[in-house]
Image: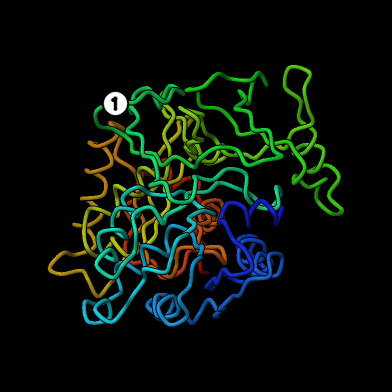
Amino acid sequence: MIFGSAAVAAADDASIGVGWLPHFHDMGLIGMLLQPLFVGGSLVYMSPMTFLKRPVRLLEAIDRYGAHITAAPNFAYELMVRRVTDAQLAQLDLSSLRVALSGAEPIRARTLDAVIERLGPAGFRADAFVAGYGMAETTLIATASPVGRPTVHLDADPAALERGRVIPAGSGTRLVGCGATVAGLDIRIVDPVTLRTLPDGHVGEIWIAGTSVAQGYWGRGEETRGSFAAHTEGVGPYLRSGDLGAHHAGDLYVTGRLKDLIILNGRNLYPQDIEEAVRGIHPALADAEGVVLSIEADGQERLLVIQGVRTNAWGGLNPAELAARIRTTVARGFEVPAPSVVLVERRAVHRTTSGKVQRASMRAAFLDRTIRAVLHEEIEPAVERMRTPVPVLV
């Protein structure tokens, strides 16, 4: 629904957007390329590689063209914060920007805060961020925070979150509110097992119905029936998003992916929370992606961390010491058995065109021993036995 995307960004024929997301990505196509065509506005577009090689170019484009709107996944905002220099920042004026949409992957409160702090002196406003949730199947935007309102954060009690409840706490797992449902859509939180609608504050699968939801997948009838024909308590059809979330005080909070959820000793663990904790252990991990996976071995679920490393930031630490820190941090911080660890060069972690980590692809690569650029491994024997045997040379 291009109209919904334009409404969320408060776009009109005087709006100027800047973007770099590829046109074959849903946010790049609908959120950036088609939106100005629909409203009659202007767009400054650069290639993804232009941005990724030198993220400050996007900020320079905002300054040069007096841009009002941009959109990107969370990781792109992190790149801008880390790579813009003080000298570059001193030359920028970002005060024209009124909408910086963040979506397409989990939105981190830490990232939003870092952008506001780092880019604030150049005129970036705290209320410019718009946190959104959407899918290609809903022709993009499903919920969004209002333009001109600082994003809402909620510190959720971690123990309650593991039990499927979002309960505010003084400190805990910080979630970002993705706003209210856009016009023309109906969003329900549904228990993926019982298929019953859950009340506010309960975590379940996000189901979506409405005018912008697609009819199905072209030429994939079985997948279409499984995803687009869901009913809850006799009401439907709904699209099953595969995402987990909860409604609280009018905002949607996305907690993770149903297929990525790790159930360990009866607890629900979200891999992105563990991945974020790992990146905070050492500078060599801070600017590198990683994945946390669950491997069933000997009848038990066991954790595996595959983490990218910036090898030029090792410092005096060797790979074995870094792996040991990861094992200790995860075990103590999440009260779980120490995970197996694989350290790789940072570009060896599989990602989509928009920068999302591909956990399923990395799991398959681990099991069949096709992970590239391995720097160090510490694998439990039970987990090692689940992998493709090493060929024996005769």
SS at badge 1: loop
62 up-or-down from 104: above or below: below
Q: Which residue is mark 1?
A: 169
| 18 and 310: which is toward the camera | 18
The residue nearer to you, when weighing 157 against 168, is: 168
Give the image location of residue 263, x and y in percent: 46, 30
Quarter of the image for residue 180 reads top right
- Residue 63 in view here: yes
Instruction: Check disc 1 and give the amino acid type.
Output: Ala
Question: What is the residue that sits farthest to the front in this orientation?
Answer: 14
Q: Is residue 334 left or right of residue 239?
A: left
| Coloring basis for residues | rainbow
Q: Tell me the crowding category of disc 1: few under 14, some 14 to 19, or many 20 or more residues within 10 angstroms, Cα based.
A: some
* Residue 387 versus residue 13 in the image, above or below: above
> Residue 21 at what x, y percent from top left?
56, 69
Q: Residue at x 35, y 30 (%)?
A: 156
Which of the 4 quarters of the picture holds residue 112? bottom left
Determine the residue located farthest toward the left in the rendered image.
316
Residue 209 screen position, x and y as percent: 73, 36
Identify the residue shown where x is 44% and y is 68%: 348
In the depicted structure, whether residue 92 falls above or below residue 204: below
Residue at point 55%, 46% (across, down): 133
Question: Does the image show residue 266?
Answer: no
* Position of residue 98 measured from the top left corner of the image (x, y, whole percent): 45, 61
